[in-house]
Image: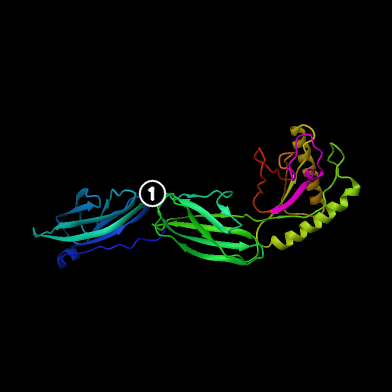
């Protein structure tokens, strides 16, 4: 959090300046984590002091105190959420029965704990290279870093805002350098300097391959189908060498079926086939984490009616990614068990 620029206007005699020292503390705080303060340090003997302040909304406050030299009195301010102006007068009773005073004028900020609202599925538009998000405090700025799958940095800089109201959609974008983004890092600041950050990895790479065929209702990999998996494993290892330099990647194996047979049985069958292929990849030297899931007939490549034998839907996807891929149309939340 950056400090807020503050002004303390002093109009006081030399005697008063020698007797006390006035300072401000916690001028920018998060609500519930302390309060702004005026601190009066007593340097020489005084008979007491009185602090009168008027808050920006017109509400007056008064405090009285004193103490021996070396004592610091702390006055906590009842500051509302937001930026608040304060004006007032500190009056000190000196030992010779005279008084001296100084005027004070300053600002405080009490910010709500900053929240960033962003739906990775709806608010990240990779085609337009734009991220849209919302803050619960007035907007200050954002810092965006975009790392591409090529290893190049597409963008690393600040985007200023103009104090937009809480809940306003805010957007940041990056230039087109001809490669998919691997990692997006967003740090959003409110108008008070409080920030919150998020990182996510929208990148994925689907390994091209020839689909393995299985006997009906089976998931054993037949010897004459192993060549297809050997070629896919080789492509997976090549992709891991290329992209694993930039982030910790995982191989996700997603099994699918056509619409013939009961949907529950198809889910189980696709899960078993995905696990069998994942196990084969592990045996072929794929050492990164491998996860698998069965989607049955819920995510077809080709839409069909029920009980239709469609070869294009009997498939398994091999996806290298950092975050778990989201497959459309699934009626359940994939668990992606780890092999």
Residue 283 on image: x %, y %? 82, 51
Residue drawn where x is 50% and y is 52% of the image: 133
Question: In the visual, does 53 lie left or right of 166?
Answer: left
In terms of secondary structure, what is the magenta stretch mainly? loop
Residue drawn where x is 56% and y is 55% of the image: 199
Residue drawn where x is 40% and y is 49% of the image: 112
Residue 26 makes an appearance in the image: no
Q: Is residue 93 above or below residue 31?
A: below
Q: Quadrant of residue 43?
A: bottom left
| 135 or 287, nearer to the observer | 135
Q: Which residue is mark 1?
A: 33
| 109 or 173, nearer to the observer | 173
217 magenta-colored: no
Question: In the visual, does 130 lie left or right of 73?
Answer: right
Q: Is residue 59 above or below residue 104?
A: above
Give the secondary structure at mark 1. Answer: loop
Question: In the visual, does 297 lie left or right of 96?
Answer: right
Q: Which quadrant would the C terminus be assigned to in this image? A: top right
Residue 308 on image: x %, y %? 80, 37
Q: Quadrant of residue 176?
A: bottom right
Q: Which quadrant would the N terminus be assigned to in this image? A: bottom left
Residue 232 on image: x %, y %? 81, 54
Residue drawn where x is 52% and y is 54% of the image: 132
Residue 106 makes an appearance in the image: yes
Residue 156 on image: x %, y %? 54, 65
Q: Is residue 255 above or below residue 178?
A: above
Q: Residue furthest left?
A: 97
Q: Which residues are magenta?
A: 300-320
309 magenta-colored: yes
| 312 or 245, nearer to the observer | 312
Q: Residues within 10 Å of mark 1 (few under 14, many from 20)?
A: few
In this figure, which colouring scheme has been used for the structure?
rainbow
């Amino acid at each position: 959090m950056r400090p807020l620029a503050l002004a303390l206007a002093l109009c006081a005699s030399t005697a008063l300046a020698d007797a006390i020292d006035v300072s401000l503390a916690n001028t920018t705080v998060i609500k519930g984590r302390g309060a702004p303060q005026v601190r009066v340090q007593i340097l020489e003997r005084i008979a007491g002091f009185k602090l009168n302040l008027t808050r920006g909304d017109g509400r007056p406050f008064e405090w009285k105190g004193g103490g021996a030299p070396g004592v610091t009195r702390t006055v906590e301010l009842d500051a509302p959420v937001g930026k608040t102006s304060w004006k007032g007068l500190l009056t000190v009773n000196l030992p010779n029965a005279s008084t001296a005073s100084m005027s004070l004028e300053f600002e405080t900020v009490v910010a709500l704990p900053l929240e960033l609202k962003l739906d990775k599925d709806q608010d990240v538009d990779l085609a337009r290279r734009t991220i849209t998000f919302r803050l619960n405090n007035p907007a200050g700025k954002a810092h965006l870093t975009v790392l591409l799958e090529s290893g190049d940095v597409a963008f690393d800089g600040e985007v200023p805002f103009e104090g937009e109201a809480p809940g306003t959609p805010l957007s940041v974008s990056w230039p087109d350098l001809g490669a998919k983004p691997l990692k997006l890092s967003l740090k959003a600041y409110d108008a008070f300097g409080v920030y919150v950050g998020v990182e996510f990895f929208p990148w994925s790479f689907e390994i091209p391959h020839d689909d393995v065929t299985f006997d009906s209702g089976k998931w054993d990999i037949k010897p004459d189908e192993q060549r297809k998996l050997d070629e896919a494993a080789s492509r997976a290892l090549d992709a891991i060498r290329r992209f694993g330099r930039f982030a910790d990647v995982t191989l996700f194996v997603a099994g699918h079926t056509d619409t013939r047979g009961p949907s529950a049985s198809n889910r189980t069958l696709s899960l078993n086939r995905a696990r069998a292929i994942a196990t084969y990849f592990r045996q072929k030297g794929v050492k990164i984490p491998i996860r698998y899931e069965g989607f049955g007939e819920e995510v077809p490549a080709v839409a069909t009616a029920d009980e239709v034998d469609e070869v294009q839907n009997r498939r398994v996807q091999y996806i290298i990614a950092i975050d778990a891929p989201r497959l459309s149309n699934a009626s359940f939340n994939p668990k992606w068990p780890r092999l």
